[in-house]
Amino acid sequence: MPLNNEVTLNDLYNCLKKIEKSSFNMPHFTGRNVPISEIAAAIKKDAQFIRVGLQNQTLDFGYAQKLPNSNEYSYYCPDKQVYEKTGYFRVA
């Protein structure tokens, strides 16, 4: 039993095993731009809910960029961010 909250080699080994095991379960991210409609279906929300959330930054799994001289927005939702925030991933 370690004294004074010391970490044993066995503790470090077990911790590293957990990290290694969890890293094998991660999907292979490509930076794919996940379409708004796909995200909306995956999290069972309306696509407009996703768009407005990205525009006002209340949703943080992507970016909304207002196009110059326009009222329209362009969206970028990288697969890794979508996965980290929603748990959704699909290989395309």
Image (cartoon, rainbow, N blue to C red):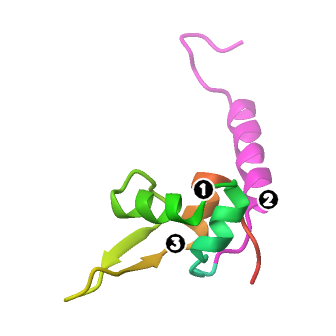
Residue ID at (36%, 56%): 57
Q: Quadrant of the C terminus?
A: bottom right
Amino acid at circle 2: Asn
Q: Is residue 61 left or right of residue 56?
A: right
Q: State the residue in front, 14 or 25.
A: 25
Label 1, on which residue? 84
Residue ID at (79%, 61%): 24
Q: Which residues are magenta?
A: 1-29
Q: Quadrant of the N terminus?
A: top right
In this rendering, is residue 20 above or below 41? above
The answer to whether the residues at label 1 and label 3 have Cβ atoms under 8 Å apart is no
Residue ID at (68%, 55%): 43
In this rendering, is residue 60 above or below 76? above
Label 3, on which residue? 77
Q: CA distance from mark 1 to mark 3?
A: 11 Å
Q: Is residue 49 left or right of residue 32?
A: left
In this rendering, is residue 1 above or below 20? above
Q: Is residue 51 left or right of residue 57?
A: right
Can residue 52 be seen in this snapshot? yes
Mark 1 or 3, which is nearer the eye? 3
Residue 6: x %, y % from top left:
57, 20
Q: Does the magenta run of residues contain 10?
A: yes
Amino acid at circle 1: Glu
Residue 66: x %, y % from top left:
29, 78
- The mark found on residue 25 in the picture is 2
- The mark found on residue 70 in the picture is none
Residue ID at (76%, 72%): 90
Amino acid at circle 3: Cys
SS assignment at label 2 = loop
Q: CA distance from mark 3 to mark 2?
A: 21 Å
